[in-house]
Image (cartoon, rainbow, N blue to C red):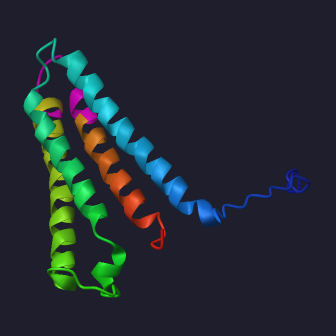
Amino acid sequence: MAGCLDNLHFDFNLDFGEKRNTVASVISGVLFFTGWWIYIDTAAYYSKEGAWSHSYIIISIVASVAMFMINAISNRYISGEAYEEGILGTKGARFWIFVAFVLSFSSIIASILVMFGDYVLVQGDHSVYPGVALFMNVFLIFLASFVYKFGRSEPY
């Protein structure tokens, strides 16, 4: 039984080369779209039942703003390898990316607090899905920002 898969040959090569930026952009876009789709679907369905507060959109907006802040700065500015410094230079770019990560992680923490505080730990017969959907929305936006930031190569 040890050699039953010996005759199968898998030529699995993931060298994207020139298409790395395209693949990272598409994956990031799909993650971002899926996160917002989950949010909009949950808000449309559960607001009829009164199990959804529309103030939760603030958490998702903060996550989206953090995504744009993370990807607005090139890695060259953060590492200090850029030819021109800009207005604030490397320290300003590092502070900007720090604030963006703080916003991103804060939105994840806020979605976890809403998920547990308003849905999971509440006694009674109710759906837990709106809390999970809010967390999935924020987490998918977080993943999209990381894929778009670190999945691309800089020269393009």
Instruction: Work out whether residue 14 or residue 74 is closer to the camera in this orientation and state it.
Output: 74
The image shows residue 136, relative to residue 125, as above or below, that is: below
- Residue 156 appearing in the image: yes
Please name the residue shown 15% across and 80% down the image. 87
Image x and y of residue 81, in percent: 35, 87
Task: Residue 50: name its quadrant.
Answer: top left
* Residue 26 horizontal side relative to residue 64, left or right: right
Question: Magenta stretch?
Answer: 120-133
The image shows residue 110, relative to residue 127, as above or below, that is: below
Instruction: Work out whether residue 121 or residue 69 is closer to the camera in this orientation and state it.
Output: 69
Q: Magenta span has 58?
A: no
Please name the residue shown 21% across and 33% down the image. 131
- Residue 128 appearing in the image: no
Please name the residue shown 22% across and 70% down the image. 97
Please name the residue shown 34% across and 45% down the image. 140
Instruction: Work out whether residue 96 or residue 130 is closer to the camera in this orientation and state it.
Output: 96
